[in-house]
Image (cartoon, rainbow, N blue to C red):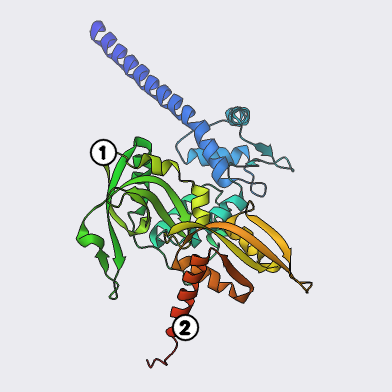
Amino acid sequence: MLILVGAVICRERCSKMGLGKAVMMANQVNQKEKILRIKDILERETDEKHPLTAGQLIKKLNGFNITAERKSVYRDLDALEKYGMDILKAEDGHGWYLASREFELPELKLLVDAVSASKFITEKKSRELVKKIEQLGSIHEEKDLHRQVVVQDRAKAENESIYYIIDTIYNCIEDDRRMQFQYFSWNENKEKTLHRDGECYEVSPAFLLWADENYYLVAYSEKDQEIRHYRVDKMLNAKEMDQPRGGKEVRKKLSEASYSKSTFGMYAGETRKITLQCASYLSNVLVDRFGSDIMMHPIAVDGTEEKRVVAHVNVQVSSQFFGWLTGLGKDISLVSPLEVREEYQEYLKAIMENYSDCYKV
């Protein structure tokens, strides 16, 4: 009988010891999680106007089933400060707050503005990205970020796969591999129409270029054996190929900065060195377009006090370049070379002929 009672007591003790050990282990896990939770709470819920006391931090920790004492919270705050977090005590001595973050509010506003205004990002993805950006600030800053810029009548892209396409492009560049994709445009019925009857394009990516509010892939076309560019949001079914990239020597000659300056509306044309002459007030327009290293100098106009400017620039001659030039009006002239000047005159003549008769709609 005594042996039986002893066995029962021993089993109960062991059971209690096992339970105690389990509780102890659970508390240890919770304590390891505690400092991470405090870090999250400081980042998301505090700023100079919204400090939290030790008691408030403990209450919030309880919501995660984490028990804490004031002394342990003080130790965690000290450890996080040594880790590099800019934790300050409130001026009145009641509570702590995170004084600075990796992204400050003005920087987050700038990011939200850029995402909201970007034409190549779809409406759905814009909302998703803005929401993620909001998470980088405190909950008290979210309302300021949520009331950011609204771009009226902004035509947003509709190709949701653009992010995967960009990833594929970068992978091809990093792996030195060719890329294939289908390319489309919109027809008069607002339907997608595949180019080349759906045949895949095969290119060797050089770099991505942001121009005219769109992403363009600048690449060596294996079929045409020359540099071409493609709107990324017009691509479908992009894939990395096994073959190494071609056109190495041609791609080597490319410069992202100079390519962007010389190309108008991403319409490719023969690159020519041209001379422009314009009124001095247009100097700012030329520098904005071609960069501060533009070859430009003032000249005097005989018999007048008027000052004009002569600029020598490299451009890809195309209808888009002529359109840009026309938009600047009569105070700018294309001086040379003569053949480009004559081509521009033919461009203007064709436009004028389009208005020789009255069209009835």
* Residue 230: quadrant of the picture: bottom left
Say which label, 1 or 2, has the lower sequence index.
1
**Foreground residue among 95 and 245:** 245
Instruction: Give the labeled residue for mark 2.
Output: 352
Q: Is residue 107 above or below residue 36?
A: below
Disc 1 secondary structure class:
strand
Look at 34% across and 19% down and name the residue there: 18
Look at 63% across and 31% down and name the residue there: 81
Judge from the rendering whether residue 83 lies leftward or rightward of residue 217; answer left or right. Answer: right
Q: Where does the image place residue 184, in percent across and percent down from the top left?
A: 29, 62
- Disc 1 to disc 2: CB gap under 8 Å: no
Image quarter (top left, top right, bottom left or bottom right) of the C terminus = bottom left
Residue furthest to the top in view is 3
Image quarter (top left, top right, bottom left or bottom right) of the N terminus = top left
Q: Where does the image place residue 264, in percent across and percent down from the top left?
A: 48, 62
Badge number at residue 286: none
* Residue 336: quadrant of the picture: bottom right
**Foreground residue among 305 and 105:** 305
Badge number at residue 243: 1
Judge from the rendering whether residue 70 lies leftward or rightward of residue 132; answer left or right. Answer: right
**Foreground residue among 82 and 17:** 82
Count of numbered labels shown in the rendering: 2
Neighbourhood count class around disc 1 (C-alpha, 10 Å): few under 14, some 14–19, many 20 upward = few
Look at 62% across and 64% down and name the residue there: 285
Judge from the rendering whether residue 82 lies leftward or rightward of residue 240; answer left or right. Answer: right
Disc 2 secondary structure class:
helix
